[in-house]
Image: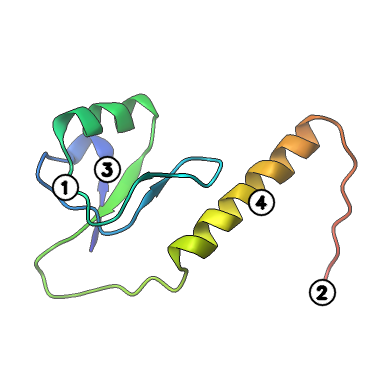
Amino acid sequence: MQKVRIENMQPGMILARSIYANDGRILVSKKTEISAPMIAKLKELRLPSAYIETHSGTEINDPISDATRSELMRSLSKFDSELRSGHSMSLISC
């Protein structure tokens, strides 16, 4: 797996990790082959980089599952919206 800047991506590359929207929705699932229109859309969304599969034999295990990452992004988006709308928030420390 290798992190690649979106402007350096090439059609035919395979995503090693899913790409998420700010609200936690999966925009492009892992194992998807990247196309030129997809690269253009990712540039339009101003995404800085993505992880692609490599043939180097070295694999990085992601300690966070796709479901957990998606839920975290949804929670952060909701938290951000609440703060921006002026609602008071209570943070509880463990």
- x 69%, y 43%: residue: 78
**In the rendered structure, which disc, 2 or 4, sits on the residue that comes first in sequence?**
4
Label 3 packing within 10 angstroms: few (<14), some (14-19), many (20+): few
**Which residue in the protein does label 1 denote?**
33
Amino acid type of the residue tagged 2 in the rendering:
Cys
For residue 72, which numbered disc appears in the image? none
Q: Position of residue 19 (x, y in %)?
A: 37, 47
**In the rendered structure, which disc, 1 or 4, sits on the residue that comes first in sequence?**
1
- Disc 3 is placed on an element classified as strand
- Disc 2 is placed on an element classified as loop
Q: Which quarter of the rendering shows the N terminus?
A: bottom left
For residue 75, which numbered disc appears in the image? 4
Between 67 and 52, the one lying in front of the other is: 67
**In the rendered structure, which disc, 3 or 1, sits on the residue that comes first in sequence?**
3
- Disc 4 from disc 3: Cα separation: 26 Å
Amino acid type of the residue tagged 3 in the rendering:
Arg
- Disc 2 from disc 1: Cα separation: 42 Å
- Marks 3/2 in contact by CB < 8 Å: the verdict is no
Between 3 and 42, the one lying in front of the other is: 42
**In the rendered structure, which disc, 2 or 1, sits on the residue that comes first in sequence?**
1
- Disc 3 from disc 1: Cα separation: 16 Å
- Disc 2 from disc 4: Cα separation: 18 Å
- Disc 4 is placed on an element classified as helix
**Which residue in the protein does label 2 denote?**
94
- Picture quadrant of residue 66: bottom left
